Amino acid sequence: MIKSVKIQNVQSHELTELEFSSGVNVIKGTSDSGKSAFIRSLKFVLQNRPGGNWAHPHFADDKALTSVALEFDNGAIKRQKNKKENCYIVNNKEKFEALRSDIPDKVQLLTNMTDINFQSQFDKYFLLQDSPGEVGRKLNTVVGLDVIDSTIKFINGVVSKETIAIERNTEERDSIQQKLEGFKFLAKVDDKIKTITNLFFDKEIKEALLAKLEPLPKLIHQFENEIKAKKEWLTVEKKFKKMNQVITVAKNLTEKINILNELAEKVRYIHAKTETMKRFLISEHYYIPLKEKIKQRSEIDLKLKAISYLHQTATNESERLRQGKEELEKGKELYISKFKLIKQCPFCGSKVNLTKEKMNEFIAKW
């Protein structure tokens, strides 16, 4: 049983509140006083009809909220609508969207009212002017036998929804399975990543070695200064011995240059391997972090250029060292000619009186 009605912003009703007593209640009034609008308000809640913007009053703006609230013995229902929302509120808690002409199940269960509960002014007399089939249908509704049809309809709706959900979930499962098939290559990629990691560790070791070789240009510059400083050694024994030391250092330098060449070759090999892995991994966009490694490879390229520059510098120094050796040979020849001339031992300073053959033999041994 409806206990009270509250109507707000419905046609001529700005705010109307009615409380009903038990039994029969009569609403009377002059024409155009809002009686028909009252009936429409009840249907608006209980039947979700009529649709459209029929209820909007002339005295309210477009944003005004139209609402009809009914209080029953077992609960309360409120229907409200404007441009932003169109919904039912049950017991001031649960909210249901009002879709098309459907009535939410919880609202229908609480009101337990259908079309047969309404008799308008121009409707046929209840049961008296209906066909036998229509009379039977209405009697079934009154005594509650229509609950079977309603239940079957509800169950069929649930089965249909669940069938659609199962089909959708099956499609999603198949789609996920296909995606998982596409990720089988990850095991191989993991091995490749480990290989690349080892290569980068090896690269770091090479970079550390390169850092140790960075003083090489300074050392070469020192050698160059020493070579310039030793050009006058040909006149004295002490400078001659220092030149021998320079030659020894130059040999060590040559060995270091050879080591540097081998290191450069290894770096080029690492570069080639990195390029190969780059072409492999560029097709797999899931491994974006490897771009940072590619950036580091670019830095290796810059260092390779620096190594090439050092190699060229070392080559130039080797050429200069070769020229120094030639000058050394010329100095030795000059020294020998002077020795033959003065006939004096370059080590002890004593005079040497030898025949020409002995003198040549002595010089050859020296």
Image (spheres, rainbow, N blue to C red):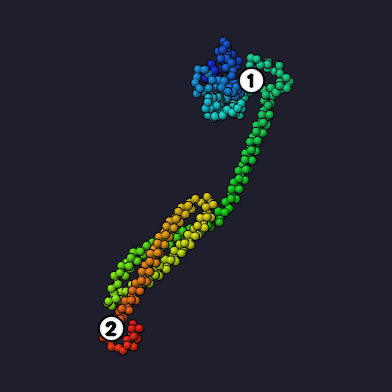
Disc 2 packing (10 Å; few <14; some 14–19; many ≥20): few
Q: Residue at x 44, y 65 (%)?
A: 263
**366 to the left or right of 27:** left
Q: Which mark is residue 50?
A: none
Q: Quadrant of residue 19?
A: top right
For the C terminus, give its image quadrant: bottom left
Q: Quadrant of residue 314?
A: bottom left
**Residue that label 1 marks:** 117
Residue 70 percent across, percent down from the top left:
56, 22
Q: Residue at x 28, y 88 (%)?
A: 353
Residue 124 percent across, percent down from the top left:
68, 16
Q: Nearer the viewer, residue 341 or 132?
A: 341
Residue 75 percent across, percent down from the top left:
56, 25
For the N terminus, give its image quadrant: top right
Disc 1 packing (10 Å; few <14; some 14–19; many ≥20): few
Q: Is residue 150 above or below residue 237?
A: above
Q: Is residue 292 above or below residue 25?
A: below
Q: Which mark is residue 341?
A: 2
Residue 61 percent across, percent down from the top left:
49, 21
The answer to whether residue 193 shows anywhere in this view is no
